[in-house]
Every structure is written in C-alpha cells, then in structure tokens.
Image (cartoon, grey):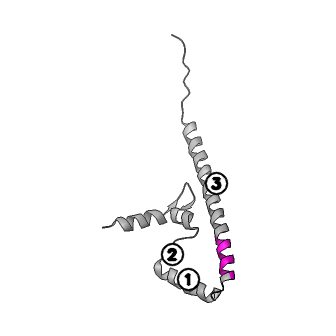
Amino acid sequence: MKLDDALWGYRTTYKKPIGMSSYALVFGKACHLPLELEHKVLWAVNKLNFDLKMAGEERKLQLLELDEWRIQAYENANIYKEHTKHWHDKRLCEKNLQVG
C-alpha cells in the first residue's frame, strides 16, 4: 500500500553521486507538490497568453537547460567515482611476493 509513497520519496531524494535527485535528472527541474504545480500552470498560461511562438521558444530553452542538468549530473558522478576510487586505493596494502 505504501509502495507509491516509497517510490515518490526515492525519486525525489537528493543523490550525492549525481548531485541532484533522479526526478530532477529526468525532468530538469525540482519536484513540486500538486498544488504548487497547479499554480505554476495558471501562471504560465497567463504569462504566455497562449502565444505558440513564445511557448515554443520557452520549450527550447527548457530543453537546453535539461541538457545542462544532465551534463552536470554526469560530471558529478565522475567526480564521485574518482573520490571513491582514491579512498579505496589509499586503503590497499602493498604485498611483496617472493619466490619460495
């Protein structure tokens, strides 16, 4: 019964390796509650006033921002992997093996 709530919590939780939530990675923006989302929709309709050309330009900008978010997440994941590898390599013990 709580699976939907658990999945919502997991998808909207900040992930350290990628530097953002998985929701933000997919959709390119922070997660909003339904009431906040409804308010933003009304605001967008009033702002754009159903101007299709302006709406298209806005959508292009959003897609470019989404690409920037994904590039940032990729870079954050690489930095996290490097730190983890460095931490692991520091704790390795060097063993000298000799014949006999």
- 81 and 98: which one is in front? 81
Distance, label 1 to label 3, CA atoms, is 30 Å
**Amino acid type at mark 2:** His
Q: Which mark is residue 87?
A: none
Tell me the residue at 61%/55% (across/down).
74
Tell me the residue at 55%/83% (across/down).
41
The N terminus is located in which quarter?
bottom left
Say which element carries label 1: helix
**Amino acid type at mark 3:** Glu
- What range of the chain is rendered magenta? 53-62
Percent coordinates x, y for residue 47 in the rendering: 64, 87
Tell me the residue at 66%/86% (across/down).
51
Disc 1 versus disc 3: nearer the observer? 1
Q: Quadrant of residue 5?
A: bottom left
Q: Which mark is residue 40?
A: 1
**Amino acid type at mark 1:** Lys
| Residue under pointer 3 | 75
| Residue under pointer 2 | 32
Percent coordinates x, y for residue 89 in the rendering: 57, 37
- 7 and 83: which one is in front? 7
User: Badge 3, how many Cα within 10 Å: few under 14, some, many 20+?
Assistant: some
**Would residue 46 appear left or right of 33 to someone viewing this image?**
right
Q: Is residue 71 magenta?
A: no
Q: Is residue 35 above or below residue 90?
A: below
Tell me the residue at 61%/50% (across/down).
78
Whichever of labels 1 and 2 marks the residue nearer the N terminus, that label is 2
**Would residue 59 appear left or right of 12 to someone viewing this image?**
right
Whether residues under marks 1 and 2 lie with C-beta atoms below 8 angstroms apart, the answer is yes
Whichever of labels 1 and 3 marks the residue nearer the N terminus, that label is 1
Distance, label 1 to label 2, CA atoms, is 10 Å
